[in-house]
């Protein structure tokens, strides 16, 4: 059985039996024309009618799926549709009419997966494979499913300038970037993932647009609030005059990806950078729209990145359902692990420099480390809200992400930088915790390839980006001299992007294969023995740390999970071994004195709470 899926929205090009409807919101613009180019034909301008609410509309009876179109402003500027579904000639080219009904979905029985079953795998479509396409990702999904991955998280796909980009410079929010393939190729990827029992999440950027190709400044200044400034210029207008239509644009975008592409959820980038003083924050309104729509029939998840650690946005209602975010990326845990494994204390790592092992245990037990305490890195500013009332599954935890790897000058991964004993132990702790674990692509086999910052801007902007990046690293002692800064890879060079691609052949070679087998073993333990007890569990765990030996306990559904790990500098002895059935143990020996712990030892047990 197959079906089609269409998200109806007031923006963009809508295909129907009588042709195509075109709609653009630009209240302060007059005299806008639509330039229509049929397949194999030439462009013809057609005047659009403007209504009192600022909408410019036109219906063309002879327009069809596959036709190209653009908007021409009164000053002669020709621009793509801000709600384009596909822009095959990049951000400055015309948009293409897409009929979403033409794709035949086969996943009609898919109802998603509950969040507590999630093991997330973050990937960049362009760098995940040599080909760098949706089709190539699709062909690798079986290997991820076999490993134990249950959710693939795609880095942002919105059309960006040039042939390569992390995705956070997207400017056409509804158009999957053409360098990866057509919209139907992305749909086929999702369809295949669902057949393998895997969720697909998409990283979306609602806090800014990229610096090249954003024509909204030209056609619709009402889209921005010049009174609110961000690192990317004027803030998106979520709370000023005219903001209702702007908010609807992003709400429809969230629904579009989840409904038309059948995605299982979104990861919202840097919501702390969204300027929204409305009574109902845009994140909450997006959650409400999802609940009123696709989430009535299946599981839909909303994951947040939020440097402010606002636990209130992760709260659960009386039925245990999220009021806004399902979970949040847990940078606190990452930072503690990074300090522990590498000894680095520059920048924001300074807040985690003291007692890193204890801070790691704190994050494992309670999620956030900063729950309202002053941050020295932020000049004493209070950061965070109490998180002990939240379920552990409200935290997505990891040893690294695209951010933490790619924002380094040379894109080194933690297994290339840190003490291998501590990296291995920390990974086991995360995978055996009740948190939702996440891998950055290649983590599972300790990939040797870096993940560098790359982009493909026009010449003037490209030069400014390269110079700015090198100047930024000039604040660090290692890059104090010009020669050292000159060695930092140019983000715009094709070689920088190519160096960041995974080398899949490594998976079968030592020591990469050994890491892969260890990860598979840990995920097998997690799925078989932990996941059945995660649903319904809530509240923080308890923790303690003595001379680098951490002990963390969580109450799950009917069970108590104990985690013991020696993250100190020397072997240790735990005189009282954790009770319960052993789930996993490495680097340990039981004798008359207790449990001998080698450096890097990890020991996890599951205790039946009925034994209390």
Image: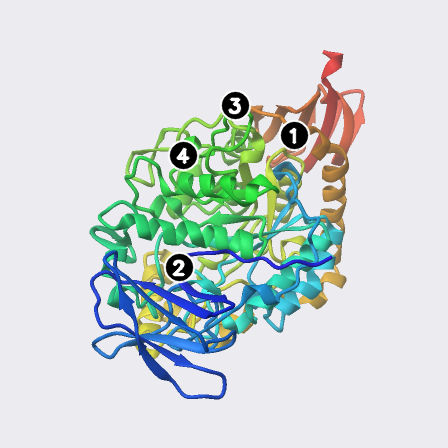
Labels 1 and 2: the sequence-earlier one: 2
Q: Nearer the viewer, residue 273 or 224?
A: 224
Q: Can residue 488 be seen in this view?
A: no
Labels 4 and 3: the sequence-earlier one: 4
Residue at x-position 54% and y-position 31%: 321
In the figure, is residue 601 to the left or right of 316? right
Residue at x-position 47% and y-position 51%: 254
Q: Residues within 10 Å of mark 2 (few under 14, many from 20)?
A: few
Q: Which residue lies furthest to the right in this view?
A: 591
Labels 1 and 4: the sequence-earlier one: 4
Which residue is label 3 attached to? 318
In the figure, is residue 440 to the left or right of 518? left
Secondary element type, mark 1: loop
Spot occupied by residue 354 in the image (x, y as percentages of width and height): 45, 34
Which residue is label 1 attached to? 535
Secondary element type, mark 3: loop
Labels 4 and 2: the sequence-earlier one: 4
Q: How crowded is mark 3: few (under 14 residues within 10 Å), some or many (20 or more)?
A: few
Q: Is residue 109 visible?
A: yes
Q: How crowded is mark 1: few (under 14 residues within 10 Å), some or many (20 or more)?
A: some
Secondary element type, mark 2: helix
Which residue is label 4 attached to? 310
Query: CA separation, marks 4 and 3?
Result: 19 Å
Q: Quadrant of residue 535?
A: top right
Labels 3 and 2: the sequence-earlier one: 3
Query: CA separation, marks 3 and 1?
Result: 15 Å
Question: Which quarter of the rendering shows the C terminus?
Answer: top right
The residue mark sitting in front, 1 or 2, is 1
Query: CA separation, marks 4 and 2?
Result: 35 Å
């Amino acid at each position: 059985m197959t079906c089609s899926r269409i998200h109806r929205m007031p923006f963009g090009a809508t295909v129907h039996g009588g042709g195509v409807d075109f709609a653009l919101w630009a209240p302060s613009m007059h005299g806008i024309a639509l330039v229509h180019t049929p397949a194999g034909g030439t462009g013809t301008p057609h005047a659009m009618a403007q209504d009192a609410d600022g909408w410019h509309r036109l219906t063309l009876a002879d327009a069809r799926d596959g036709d190209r179109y653009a908007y021409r402003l009164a000053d002669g500027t020709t621009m793509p549709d801000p709600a384009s579904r596909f822009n095959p000639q990049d951000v400055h080219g015309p948009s293409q009419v897409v009929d979403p009904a033409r794709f035949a979905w086969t996943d009609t029985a898919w109802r998603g997966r509950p969040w507590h079953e999630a093991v997330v795998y973050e990937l960049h479509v362009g760098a995940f494979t040599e080909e760098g396409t949706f089709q190539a990702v699709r062909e690798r999904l079986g290997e991820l499913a076999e490993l134990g991955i249950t959710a693939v998280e795609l880095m942002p796909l919105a059309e960006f300038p040039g042939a390569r980009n992390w995705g956070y410079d997207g400017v056409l929010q509804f158009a999957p970037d053409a360098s990866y393939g057509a919209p139907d190729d992305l749909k086929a990827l999702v369809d295949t993932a669902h057949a393998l029992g895997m969720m697909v999440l998409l990283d979306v950027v609602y806090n800014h647009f990229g610096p090249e190709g954003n024509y909204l400044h030209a056609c619709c200044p009402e889209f921005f609030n010049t009174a609110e400034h961000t690192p990317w210029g004027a803030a998106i207008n979520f709370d000023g005059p005219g903001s209702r239509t702007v908010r609807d644009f992003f709400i429809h975008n969230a629904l579009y990806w989840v409904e038309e592409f059948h995605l299982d959820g979104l990861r919202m980038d840097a919501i702390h950078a969204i300027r929204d003083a409305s009574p109902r924050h845009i994140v909450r309104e997006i959650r409400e729209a999802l609940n009123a729509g696709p989430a009535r029939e299946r599981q839909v998840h909303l994951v947040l990145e939020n440097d402010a650690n606002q636990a209130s946005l992760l709260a659960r209602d009386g039925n245990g359902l999220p009021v806004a975010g399902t979970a949040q990326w847990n940078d606190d845990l990452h930072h503690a692990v990074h300090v522990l494994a590498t000894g680095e204390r520059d920048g924001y790592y300074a807040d985690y420099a003291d007692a890193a092992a204890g801070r790691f245990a704190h994050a494992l037990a309670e999620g956030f480390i900063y729950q309202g305490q002053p941050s020295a890195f932020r000049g004493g500013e209070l950061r965070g809200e109490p998180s002990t009332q939240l379920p552990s599954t409200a935290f997505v935890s990891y040893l690294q992400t695209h951010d933490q790897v790619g924002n380094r000058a040379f894109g080194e991964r933690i297994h290339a930088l840190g003490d291998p004993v501590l990296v291995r132990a920390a990974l086991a702790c995360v995978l055996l915790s009740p948190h939702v674990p996440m891998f950055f692509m290649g983590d599972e086999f300790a990939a040797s390839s870096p993940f560098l910052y790359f982009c493909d801007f026009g010449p003037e902007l490209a030069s400014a980006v390269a110079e700015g990046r090198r100047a930024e690293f000039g604040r660090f002692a290692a890059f104090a001299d010009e020669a050292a800064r000159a060695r930092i890879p140019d983000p715009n060079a094709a070689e920088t992007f190519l160096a960041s691609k995974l080398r899949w052949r490594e998976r079968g070679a030592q020591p990469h294969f050994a890491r892969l087998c260890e990860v598979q073993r840990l995920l097998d333990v997690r799925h078989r023995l932990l996941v059945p007890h995660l649903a319904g569990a809530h509240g923080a765990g308890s923790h303690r740390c003595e001379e680098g030996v951490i002990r963390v306990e969580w109450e799950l559904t009917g069970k108590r999970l104990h985690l013991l790990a020696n993250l100190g500098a020397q072997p240790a002895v735990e005189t009282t071994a954790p009770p319960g059935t052993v789930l996993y143990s490495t680097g340990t020996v039981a004798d008359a004195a207790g449990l001998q712990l080698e450096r890097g030892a990890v020991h996890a047990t599951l205790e039946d709470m009925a034994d209390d």
